[in-house]
Image (cartoon, rainbow, N blue to C red):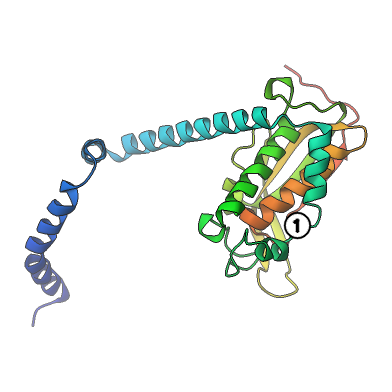
Amino acid sequence: MQNIDAVVRAIQADLTPQFEERLRAQLATADREWLIDQIVRLTLDAHSLAEIDRKVERDAKARARAERIERVKAMALTHESLAAFTAEHATVSRETLQASGHLSPDAPAKGTAQLTAEHRSPAGEELLRRAKDVLYALLFGDEQTNTQLERMQQELLTFALPRFKASALDFMRASTELAAAGTWQDPDSVSNDERADNVVLEVQFGETADELVGNGIIAALTIINNLDVNEQVLYARMINVEQTTLIG
């Protein structure tokens, strides 16, 4: 009696002509530049492919950051517009976002998978993008990004999120990233974690006299969590920095 390998080879031999025919038909309609790129990839070793992929990723992040900076400049965040943003989104929650159609009713439960574009409506995508732009302006905005806030003191924002969801905040810069193991006992037993692999980010930012920046950060992070990160509790803390320096 034939072994399983022989059976598999026989089936593959029968299907090869059909496979080749369908492959040729599919490639005949493909974009020429894409075909060239794929042929080049087939000739490279694993190390070269990894280097190319890293460069593509770096270039994509650089483009995304440049686009975000341009949007932040156009937003021209002021004390008044920040106050309006914070007031408008003061009651944001998963339930309100689903009721308004920003978030799909069948989105993964909080504390499980990270949300993706398929879980958000176009309005949800726009709100998420705006929340990330506002957060960027609050943490890093200055005259060069047309951010007009009278910052009076320095504060340190610390927040933690699972490492596999860190891509939600990959637009951050000038931040300190630390590895941390977290434990979370979910009362509803949806997302219990024991020694979970977390990332802790620390960012120093300038605060206004009325602490409006901090309120805006909380509003932006609430939107980001409910439309992207999808944690039951997104830990964040802000403390006043009495004295700081950079030592060369």
When the figure is inspected, residue 184 is found, relative to residue 24, above or below; the finding is: below
Q: Is the N terminus in the top left, top right, bottom left or bottom right quadrant? A: bottom left
Residue drawn at the location 83% of the way across and 48% of the way down: 87
139 displayed left or right of 227? right
Q: Which residue is mark 1?
A: 92
> Which of the 4 image quadrants contains residue 78?
top right
Residue shown at the point (78%, 40%) measured from the top left:
157
Which quadrant would residue 135 be assigned to in this image? top right
Residue closest to the eye, 86 or 40: 86
Q: Looking at the image, is 149 positioned above or below residue 201?
A: above
Q: Quadrant of residue 95?
A: bottom right
Kindly identify the amino acid type of the residue bearing the numbered disc 1: Val
State the residue at coordinates (22%, 45%): 30
Classify 154 as above or below 239: above
Residue at image position (79%, 37%) is 81
Which percent across, then down, holds residue 227? Answer: 63, 55
Residue 23 lies, in percent from the top left, at 16, 54
216 and 85: which is toward the camera: 85
